[in-house]
Amino acid sequence: MRRRLGFLCAQFAALFALAAGPLAGTALADKASNTIRFAYDQAPEHADPYFNNVRIGTILGQHVWDTLIYRDPSTGAYKGQLATAWRQVDDRTIEFDLRHGVKFHNGDELTADDVVFTLDYVSKPENKVTTQANVSWIDHAEKIDPYKVRLVTKQPFPAALEYLAGPIVIEPRRYFETAGTKGQNEKPVGSGPYRVTSHVIGKSITLERNPDYFADGPKPRPTIARIEIRFIPDAQTRQAEVMSNGLDFIMSVAKDQADQMGAVPFLKVVSGETLRIAFMQMNTLPETPTKPLLDLRVRRAINHAIDRDTMVKQLVGEGARVIDTICHPAQVGCTAEGATRYPYDPAKAKALLAEAGFPNGFEVDIAAYRERQQTEAIISYLRAVGIRANLRFLQYAAMRDLVRGNRAGLTHQTWGSFSVGDVSAGTPVWYGFVGDDINHDPEVRDLLKQGDTTMQPEARKTTYAKALGLIAERALAVPLYSLPTYYVANADLQFKAYPDETPRFWEMSWK
């Protein structure tokens, strides 16, 4: 790990010299054109937020589409977005009054037909929304009149407003029925503050300010006219470009690299904790490609092998915290009370491996898609106790396909819960007997489902605590830490970082 850090320092020394040279004062072109050039590491497999589950999909969803409700990121208060008012009719029914005069980017006016179509379409499993947990609680929607809708849930679902303010965006019915999911990928249409004017699939998306965006909602009409988004998988390339004024904004920058770039005069670094957590999945299905993981002692050994405290201090950075259960402590229902803890103890890890019949360890691939430096540190810790881990670093969709195809033994994952502040948006994704569940523990599944559908807060917490405790006791995963996000931007770009890990370009402006 020290060799890698030395190599990165040398690279940044060269880049800093470049930044101090002739290009250092040339951040004028984008201010003049009122454009932000933004690069992200993962290309979404689909532009529509229902059909991808990477963070850039969430970001696009909030800019190109709108939700019924908006959650204020500073206060947590729910505000009317496409809905102006709502009321809980009973434990399974919510009624919404819709905003009048909202137009989609193709000129169609929003009505109850669009809301009913969206909610009914995404809730059907055959329509293959990528993250089923986001929509599986919806039973159906009913049109009361052109501007009034009722949403009916399958069971009581206390987190409904959180989802309706997050991943549940509203599609334009007439356009979607004609263009289909293919058209919504190639030429997306929403009602949000920005419209898509170009999508080069896998390479770039260009957003331009929506001139018809309504003025009295919680998202202000944007000041920035144009957002040019490029997908650049290589971190060094992204960082080199922002330091040579080829980009204005990047995010998810490693701590040591952000520290280096913070010294560049025309750049600024902003950071803060998010709802994203890092963890390791361990495949315990009968057909797992890594048979040693079927032994509880091996899984506990892996937990004891990782020095999470040191990783947080040296690699992850300020705003992170070690976690002991598979959820973020800020989410409703998340607790570590009574959960088994696995302190860093390499000697105990070795003893457990020997007891399980692996005194010389074993070989395993570890799949990962971001935070490569952290994955490499994990590999070093595993090798120190005899587990010869080999890195398979992939784009997220490719790694997800390995997991869902039962072709991954160990994975280093992160999950931002679509910025939903409720356990139901995280833990059940991995333990709900759907595609990403590579453990299939029925007791855990049933407890999580009970927690998801219990209206009483204390009863929810108790039920979730039992489920989270079983996951820890059975060492089905390795909880690591929460992740801060480091943003590096042109010093003249004014913006605020929020805990929901969503940059709000509609709020940004140039000095």
Image (cartoon, rainbow, N blue to C red):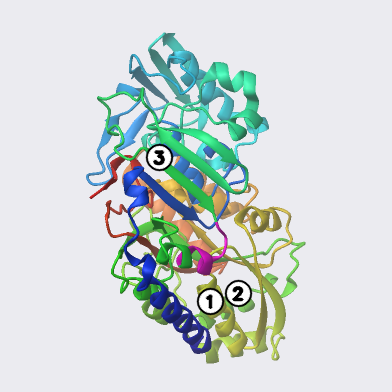
Q: CA distance from mark 1 to mark 2?
A: 6 Å
Residue 299, disc: 2
The residue that mark 1 highlights is: 303
Please state which of residues 173 and 240 is positioned toward the viewer in this rendering. 240
Q: Main secondary structure of the magenta part?
A: helix
Which residue type does callout 2 highlight? Arg
- Mark 1 closeness class: few <14, some 14–19, many ≥20 residues within 10 Å: many
Q: CA distance from mark 3 to mark 1?
A: 46 Å
Q: For the magenta stretch, what is the residue range?
A: 232-239
Which residue type does callout 1 highlight? Asn
The residue that mark 3 highlights is: 226
Which residue type does callout 3 highlight? Arg
- Residue pictured at 27% horizontal, 25% vertical: 215
| Observer able to see residue 157 | no
Q: Position of residue 43 (x, y in %)?
A: 58, 50
Q: Is residue 233 magenta?
A: yes
- Mark 3 closeness class: few <14, some 14–19, many ≥20 residues within 10 Å: many
Please state which of residues 169 and 182 is positioned toward the viewer in this rendering. 182
Q: Residue furthest top?
A: 145
Q: Position of residue 222 (x, y in %)?
A: 31, 36
Image marks 3 and 2: residues in contact by CB distance under 8 Å: no
Q: Is residue 274 magenta?
A: no
Image marks 1 and 2: residues in contact by CB distance under 8 Å: yes
